[in-house]
Every structure is written in C-alpha cells, then in structure tokens.
Amino acid sequence: MSPSLIAELLLLGTITGFLAGLLGVGGGMMQVPFMTIILTMRGVPNALAVKMAIATSMATILFTSMSSVRAHHGRGAVRWDLVRTLAPGIVAGGLIAGAGIFAIVKGTALALFFALFVGFSATQMLLDRKPAASRQMPGTAGSLGAGGAIGLISGLVGAGGAFISVPFMTWCNVPIRNAVGTSAALGFPIALANTVGYVFSGWDVQGGPVGSLGYLWLPGLAVVASASVLTAPFGARTAHTMDVAKLKRFFAFMLYGLAAYMLSRAF
C-alpha cells in the first residue's frame, strides 16, 4: 500500500470511529461512499467496489463497536436487557443479508438502495419526531422481528444499524443516551453475522484488489479499524458532554451529499 493510500484510510478511520462513538453509528454511512471512491480510483470495477466498500465498512464495526461500547457501558448507558432481546433477530437477519441477498443483488442496485436509505435516515434525523408517552419496547416476538429487520437492512448498506435501532428505541421511549449506547453494543452481532456472510458469499469473486477475502478488503480493513478503534472512545465520551442534537442536524445535511454521490454511482 502506498503512503498516500494509507493516509487516506487513516483519515477515514479517524473520522468514522469518532462518529461511531458519538452517534452510535458504525461509521458506514460515511465510510461506504469514500471507500467506494478509493477502490474505484485503484481500478476496481464500480459494481464490485460498492460491494467491497459495504462489506469492509461492516467489518470495521467489529472493532469500533467493542471500543465504543466499553466507554458507553462505563457510563451506564447500555441497556443489556434490550441487547439480549434484539440480538437473536439481528444475527438471523444479518446472515440472510450477508450470505444470501448480498451475493445476488447487483452492486449498482445496492448503491441505489444505500442512497435511498441514507437519504431517509438523514430526514429522520432532521425531523427528530417525539414518541407517544405510552409507547414501550415490544415483547419477544416483536423484538425478534425488529432485530431481523435491523440486521437485514444493515447488511445491505454496510452500516451498524444505529440509523434504524436508535430511532426505533427512542420511538419506544428509551432515553437517547441509552439508545445510542445500546446501539453501539448491537453493532457487534450485526457486524459478525454479516461479515461471515460476506466472506462466504464472495469466496469466488474475481477482480478485487490484493488482499481480498470474499468481499472484504483486508488491508483497508486493517488500516481503517486501527484508527477508528482509537477515536471511538473519544466520540462516546463527547456524546455525554455536548448537545448531540445540533451535531445530528449538521451530520444529516452531510448525509444528503453522500446519498447524492451514491445515487450517481447507481446510474
């Protein structure tokens, strides 16, 4: 890897790791578009670059989730009871996405889905709708279904699921800081299930860069993860000391720009 490529990946990992801790997002919303650019600039076909960016982004969450959840747990922000009820569905949905649907759907279609999903997520962040006071988390069956949807959609866009799980939990009247901390903990089973699926479904894929394993780009994963693990705890600590709502509005507008870029890749 050239020094310039390492520098690009370190910067990407630094920013996405901080956001993973701050907002409970796995960093995939930013990481996928920029990693797609990095891969296509190095000769990877566009459709494959999108898939590899999604898969590699998801794999970094294995590391950032452990780093950020430690910081959130230290402040009592993780609802482990919710992690236990949502995780089984998340693993099932992640395996279906990573090992099945991901290999069948074309990269251009995934880019389109990613763009639409990011645009929807940005809009939800801007609206910041308040839940009804009486609404609570669902029972076992409802949590299994919600977890399955989170795992499935996360696997198709390469994100840690926070853009679904955080609004879902706050909609069910879980306090925002608990929702962010719990989402960070849920990132690990999401990433594990999907990463296993990406390796399995992309085992015979040709045309990837040196160091590829299935749809994973291992050198890129190593550099980005090493930086993001260091910055995720800073983001988690910042989440407990600042007005995250203002930052979310800024982040939402940035997501619109990234969604527009991925939309251009889809067409």
Image (cartoon, rainbow, N blue to C red):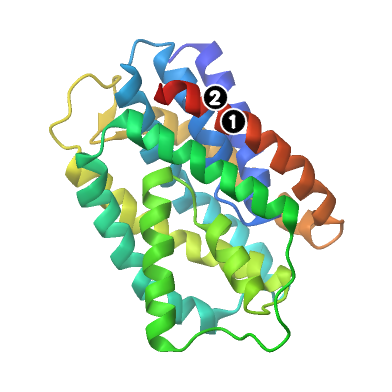
Q: Residue at x 29, y 67 (%)?
A: 92
Assign a secondary structure to mark 1: helix
Q: Residue at x 21, y 50 (%)?
A: 99
- Residue 170's place in the image compared with 205, above or below, is below
**As shown in the figure, which amino acid type bears the numbered disc 1?**
Leu
Residue 87 as seen in the image, left or right of residue 253:
left
| In front of the other: 84 or 145 | 145
Residue 49 as seen in the image, left or right of residue 260:
left
Assign a secondary structure to mark 2: helix
**As shown in the figure, which amino acid type bears the numbered disc 2?**
Tyr
Q: Position of residue 135 (x, y in %)?
A: 64, 85
Quarter the C terminus occupies: top left
Q: Position of residue 105 (x, y in %)?
A: 25, 39
- The tally of labels here is 2
| In front of the other: 42 or 143 | 143
Res. 233 in view: no
Q: Position of residue 234 (x, y in %)?
A: 73, 50
- Tell me whether circle 2 and circle 1 mark residues in contact (CB < 8 Å): yes
Which residue does the numbered mark 2 point to in the structure image? 261
**Spatial separation of the CA atoms under disc 2 and disc 1:** 5 Å
Which residue does the numbered mark 1 point to in the structure image? 258
Q: Residue at x 60, y 50 (%)?
A: 121
